Image (spheres, grey):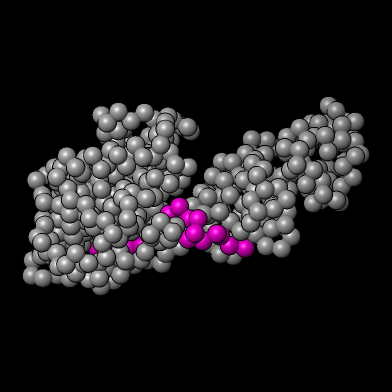
């Protein structure tokens, strides 16, 4: 079998790339070991797929080379993908500023991509095992369970290591190393934290409680909700900061991100001197959490009026609420991570065509590369943008 382009991976980036190459007149084949295309698309966004973010900029991505993603993101912007889904009649909603989700189901996004591939004449072979990729003269050859396949160009769109139950493997990294490319260390990103000992037990007691917070670590800060779980901390703020957190780091959590607690408590002491601190806490937090705070810090007599608290005592509470320091034991790992940090180094990859420099027959796109977005639709926009840039140049 001979094709102009063979795309390895039937995920977001792979499907997008294949359709573009097909429309350009290339004979295109997609191979995937999974039994269904777009599995991660279907489970993303709680089954409704946060398919882009209207505010996407290069600053929303992590990479050893932060400039690499600029070209593709400029050429294929969020409004381009929105136009595509609108042409296919997909209804969508903006749940948070800039974050677009399917109004009904993520199946709608997969339907768009598969329809585009069908219209472009792309062949898709699922349940196919791939054992070897090699260069043969000016072409590429793949050894597969379907037999030997020759291709003018091979595009690796295998994704990262997150959620192995969805079929994630390190095959893309193996191909990169085989051809002499550097693969930067990988670790789970956008993943919940685990806690240990006392704090794990405390979090478990509060499982299901959500709070608006601001979390900081390694010079990054996110103002998003936090969720207590049986194992530790989750919610958007924790997923976001997990991508910049390193083992051993502490995180700083502001439990009242829009309030200067020291100033508020001093004002309350003057205006309502007979009010109890427990009352003040109960006005700002869910009942279960306010009660837990009182149990965690028994050094204060919470039933005494604010008038009896000196500045030092109020400052201690301000520190606890505005600058809560916590050291996670770790993360939940690949099992629940939404993305993979690190991956194939972009140093040897063209930011225009995504081809390997000095080997244009081999290309890498999407999450397999060392480009990882924040939470909020950015990773899908990277899949679309890198897929289009590569597909149109094949």
Residue at horizontal 51 percent and vertical 61 percent from the top:
333
Where 195 sits versus 114, above or below?
Answer: below
User: Closest to the observer: 99 or 72?
Assistant: 99
Answer left or right for 353 relative to 277: left
Q: Residue at x 55, y 59 (%)?
A: 332
- Residue at coordinates 30% horizontally, 28% vertically from top-left? 89
Judging depth in this view, the residue of 278 and 270 nearest the camera is 278
Spot occupied by residue 367 in the image (x, y as percentages of width and height): 35, 55
Q: Is residue 394 left or right of residue 50?
A: left
Q: Quadrant of residue 356?
A: bottom left
Task: Say left or right for 366 vs 61.
Answer: left
The percent position of residue 75, horizontal first and vertical second, equals 24, 41
Q: Position of residue 41 (x, y in %)?
A: 37, 46
Name the residue rendered at 42%, 31% in the picture.
103
Q: Which quadrant of the rendered structure holds the N terminus?
A: bottom left
Q: Position of residue 156 (x, y in %)?
A: 25, 59
Residue 31 seen from this side:
yes
Number of numbered labels in the structure image: 0
Near-viewer residue (124 or 97): 124
Residue 244 visible within the image? no
Question: Vertically, is 241 above or below 346?
Answer: above
Instruction: Say which quarter of the image contains residue 149.
Output: bottom left
Residue 335 located within the stretch drawn in magenta? yes
| Residue 264 shown in magenta | no
Q: Which residues are magenta?
A: 329-348
Q: Is residue 155 above or below residue 81?
A: below
| In the rendered image, the vertical position of residue 385 relative to residue 147, given as above or below | above
């Amino acid at each position: 079998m001979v094709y102009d382009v063979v795309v390895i991976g039937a995920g977001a980036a792979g499907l997008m790339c294949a359709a573009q190459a097909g429309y350009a007149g290339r004979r295109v084949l997609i191979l995937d070991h999974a039994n269904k295309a777009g599995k991660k698309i279907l489970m993303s966004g709680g089954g409704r797929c946060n398919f882009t973010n209207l505010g996407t900029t290069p600053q929303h991505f992590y990479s050893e080379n932060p400039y690499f993603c600029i070209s593709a993101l400029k050429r294929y912007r969020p409004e381009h993908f929105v136009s595509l889904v609108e042409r296919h009649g997909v209804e969508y909603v903006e749940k948070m500023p800039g974050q677009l989700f399917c109004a009904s189901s993520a199946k709608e996004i997969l339907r768009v991509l598969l329809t585009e591939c069908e219209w472009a004449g792309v062949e898709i072979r699922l349940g196919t095992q791939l054992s070897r990729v090699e260069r043969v003269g000016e072409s590429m050859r793949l050894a597969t369970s379907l037999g030997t396949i020759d291709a003018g160009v091979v595009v690796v769109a295998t994704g990262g290591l997150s959620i192995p139950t969805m079929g994630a493997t390190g095959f893309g990294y193996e191909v990169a190393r085989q051809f002499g490319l550097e693969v930067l260390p990988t670790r789970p990103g956008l993943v919940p934290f685990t806690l240990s000992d006392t704090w794990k037990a405390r979090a478990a007691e509060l499982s299901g409680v959500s709070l608006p917070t601001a979390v900081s670590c390694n010079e990054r800060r996110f103002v998003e909700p936090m969720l207590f779980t049986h194992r530790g901390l989750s919610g958007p703020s924790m997923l976001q900061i997990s991508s910049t957190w390193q083992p051993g780091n502490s995180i700083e959590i502001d439990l009242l991100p829009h309030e200067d607690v020291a100033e508020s408590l001093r004002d309350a002491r003057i205006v309502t001197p007979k009010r109890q601190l427990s009352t003040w806490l109960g006005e700002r937090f869910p009942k279960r959490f306010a009660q837990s705070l009182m149990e965690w810090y028994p050094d204060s007599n919470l039933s005494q009026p604010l008038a009896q608290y000196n500045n030092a005592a109020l400052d201690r509470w301000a520190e606890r609420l505005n600058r809560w320091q916590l050291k996670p034991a770790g993360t939940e790992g690949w099992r629940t991570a939404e993305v993979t940090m690190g991956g194939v180094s972009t140093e040897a990859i063209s930011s225009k065509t995504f081809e390997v420099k000095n080997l244009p027959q081999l290309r890498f796109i999407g999450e397999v590369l060392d480009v990882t977005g924040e939470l909020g639709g950015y990773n899908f926009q990277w899949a679309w943008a890198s897929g289009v840039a590569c597909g149109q140049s094949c």
